[in-house]
Amino acid sequence: MYNAVMQKLFLKSYAWFYRNFIKKFLFLFDPEFVHDLIANVGGKMGTIGISRNLVRKIFYFKNRKLNQKIAGISLDNPVGLAAGFDYQAKLTKILPVLSFGFQTIGTITNHSYAGNPKPRLGRLPKSKSLMVNKGFKNPGIKEIVKKLQKKEFKIPVGLSIGKTNTSKNMTQKEAVEDIISAFKIAECSRVNFSYYELNISCPNLFGDVDFYPPENLKNLLKDVTDLKLKKPLFVKMPIEKSDEQTLEMLNIISNFSIAGVIIGNLQKNRKDKVLNLEEVKKFPVGSFSGKPTEKRSNELIELAFRNYGKKLIIIGCGGIFNAQDAYKKIKLGASLVQLVTGLIFEGPQLASQINIDLVRLLKKDGFINISEAIGADADIN
């Protein structure tokens, strides 16, 4: 392995080359086509020993300052791939050598779904955002567990589960039963998942099912936790709710056997100040990822940590494009962070760069381990 100085220099050079050449070329093509291409190429590289080892030699970074044990799960670093990117479970072998500490597959549903009508994905370069309108596009839980049966994972792999998206208007009860069925299949499988995510916050689904009202949320969580899941469960939260509504949801969640929350999901507000309105006009449907989610995500991370930090683990998600973005979420109360959009805009070296720079930031602040930084900037008075 070449030394850390050489690695940092190479990654910085590669990032420059990606942003100025590779990304510009890829952005000439349909974003969903490019997404599928990257997933296929990454998946193939992960299965070939020579290519996987080459990627590891160049991109892999590890430092004990980043080691943590969260909800009983040992992690080499706090940077994970969020749900929404690898919904076909293709990248489990390549992500570890790209220095990801964990990944979430999904969101996966009880039945397969081909995706919402196009456009399902769009780019907003000036906003540093993606328009997302997939609506839980995925092959279904049975196909996923069949694909992953008996496979070994080098990093913790979680499964995000949500309600099957269908034009058939499910009742609230049917939606809960649909989610429970997916969890049962996952639990009965021989797939070595490290954790589960319950995605109640996708804004691009058909129907009138709503898990935000207190009674609806209680009913869902009661039925899910009654399953006595073998792995820790995290709930994926929305970011468009008020502080009061969010606290009400967190209070309900904290009364069940749930490890923590992921804050949060897509930006529904099409007038958010970070969004370039001319870019938004190109997309009459969908919600937005990336930088438009960052401010509210950070506010809610601090709110959750201040009020429920002793009861719930917080995973920060939204607008992470560099180590400073990740570190801010951690110092506001996130134990771990997840990203997707930053990877697309900055390049596949991003997790490595974030981890290298996190070590530097920890040293600068006098922290021996990343766990000491959690909540350091949260206003708990």
Image (cartoon, rainbow, N blue to C red):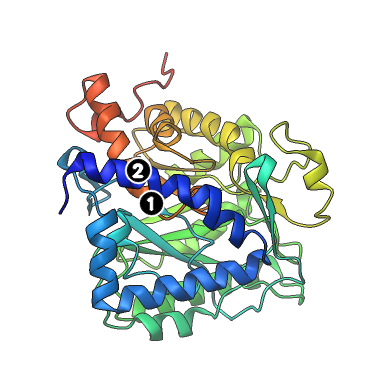
Marks 1 and 2 close (CB-CB < 8 Å): yes
Which residue is identified by label 2? 353
Q: From what the image shows, is residue 367 above or below residue 265?
A: above
Secondary structure beneath disc 1? loop
Q: From what the image shows, is residue 227 above or below residue 251?
A: below
Mark 1 crowd level (few <14, some 14–19, many ≥20, 10 Å Cα): many
**Relative to 217, is 155 on the left or the right?**
left
- Could you say which quadrant of the image residue 313 lies in? top left
In the rendered image, the residue lying farthest to the top is 381
Q: Nearer the viewer, residue 84 or 6?
A: 6
Secondary structure beneath disc 2? helix
Q: Position of residue 317 (x, y in %)?
A: 49, 44
Q: From what the image shows, is residue 273 above or below residue 95?
A: above
**Residue 27 visible in the current orientation:** yes
Which residue is identified by label 1? 349
**Residue 261 visible in the current orientation:** no
Tag 2: residue type?
A: Gln
Tag 1: residue type?
A: Gln
Residue appearing at x 62%, y 31% in the figure? 244
Residue appearing at x 15%, y 54% in the figure? 1
Q: From what the image shows, is residue 272 above or below residue 23?
A: above
Q: Nearer the viewer, residue 32 or 208?
A: 32
- Could you say which quadrant of the image residue 59 lies in? bottom left
Mark 2 crowd level (few <14, some 14–19, many ≥20, 10 Å Cα): many
Q: Position of residue 145 (x, y in %)?
A: 40, 81
Q: Nearer the viewer, residue 33 or 250?
A: 33
**Relative to 214, is 4 on the left or the right?**
left
Q: Position of residue 161 (x, y in %)?
A: 50, 66
Say which mark, if any, is on residue 35.
none
**Relative to 240, is 111 on the left or the right?**
left
Quadrant of the image containing the C terminus: top left
Q: Position of residue 89 (x, y in %)?
A: 43, 73
